[in-house]
Image (cartoon, rainbow, N blue to C red):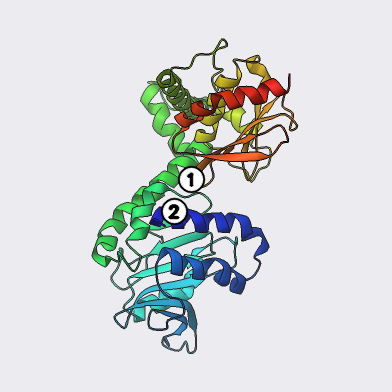
Amino acid sequence: MEFAERLDSIATKVKNQATAIGTEEATKNAFVMPFISTILGYDVFDPIEVVPEFTADVGTKRGEKIDYAIMRNGEVQILIECKPSMGSLKIEHASQLFRYFAVTNARVAVLTNGAVWHFYTDLDAPNRMDAKPFLVLDLLDIDETLIPEIQKLSKESFDLDSIISAAEELKYIGALKREIASQFREPTDDWIKFFATRVYERSYTQKVREQFTGLVGKAAQQFLTERVNDRLKTALGASGISSASPVQPVTSAEAAAEDLDRDTEIETTLEELEGYQIVKAIACGEVKPQRVTHRDAKSYFAVLLDDNNRKPVARLHFNGKQKYLGLLNEDKVEERHPIGDLDEIYSHAEAIREAVRRYQ
């Protein structure tokens, strides 16, 4: 398999099994060792390549062990410390990594719970592990832009100089993306003031701050909504398919989130909303737009008729790297169709309309 396919395969394994893994040892066996083997390409059963329970006494600390040390040419290159599956990762969990990083030749350290992988190096001070990771890989929500950087860490493509040279940019881009996302969700006073003082010419008072607290949040939501609708218009225009009923645009990102996130652990993506709008545009050839609704779940995003779980029109499986459009036959048996681009949903237009007609 290609590297991205192997990554997608282990991501699927994590999604399916994470809730059943409760201990650190189980996490190692189920997720960490397969990652080292299939993604990084090292033989976990060859002590020349992978040393489990690696020991390097540090000062007065004797007998401490790091979970795995990956070796190249007899030298430690990567240190890996594991925590139980689905447990949160905090820098406090990395105390042994800090100590071992300083006394070995390792330039890369990894803290993981099997699902989330934090990669560290020594950008801030030589031979001292940074407090913040330069790369964060979440197997439950893979950022495809990071795949080439992960591949550089594999045995086949290992390129330490390239890894280190790209680490600083990756570190700050990742941190900025997370900060921007946080500000969109809940803008801070500094963020509010930053924008308010650029559009409001009078003095920035407490009253103005209170007024712009809501306005900045609303503007951010509407900006995201408009981006979604712009992409939908482009997709619909390129498809050449028209509907008797117009596509209903997403009117509020906040309203969409409230409706879709019925389970607080569910995160609805813009891509799922776009896919929903395309399915709805097709279905509207058979029924009125308001009858086509949606519900998000942990495993898939459902498009329904009359907001009824017994009337599924389609299912969007967009959580992995490979996207699937799920269509159910008359016996409610689902068949998944792989799609590379959202526009490919249009090639299943007749099947979607047939699903709607069955409920009439």
Residue 156 lies left or right of residue 295; in this view the side is left
What residue do we see at 75% from left, 32% from top? Answer: 310
Residue 213 in sight in this render: no
What residue do we see at 64% from left, 23% from top? Answer: 354
What residue do we see at 45% from left, 72% from top? Answer: 80
- Quadrant the N terminus occupies: bottom left
Tell which of 45 and 177 is nearer to you. Answer: 45
Residue 348: image x %, image y %? 54, 28
Q: Secondary structure at mark 1?
A: loop
> Compared to 280, does 186 lie above or below?
below
> Compared to 57, does 150 lie above or below?
above
Which mark is drawn over residue 5? 2
The three-letter code of the residue at mark 1 reads Gln
Residue 19: image x %, image y %? 66, 59
- Dividing the picture into quadrants, the one containing residue 57 is bottom left
- Quadrant the C terminus occupies: top right
Residue 33 in sight in this render: yes
Q: Can you name the residue that lies furthest to the top here?
A: 244
Q: Earlier in the sequence, mark 2 or mark 1?
A: 2
Residue 162 lies left or right of residue 180; in this view the side is left
Residue 320: image x %, image y %? 51, 47
Residue 188: image x %, image y %? 49, 39
Q: Secondary structure at mark 2?
A: helix
The three-letter code of the residue at mark 2 reads Glu
Residues tagged 2 and 1 counted as in contact (Cβ below 8 A): yes
Tell which of 131 and 236 is nearer to you. Answer: 236
Q: Label 1: which residue?
A: 322
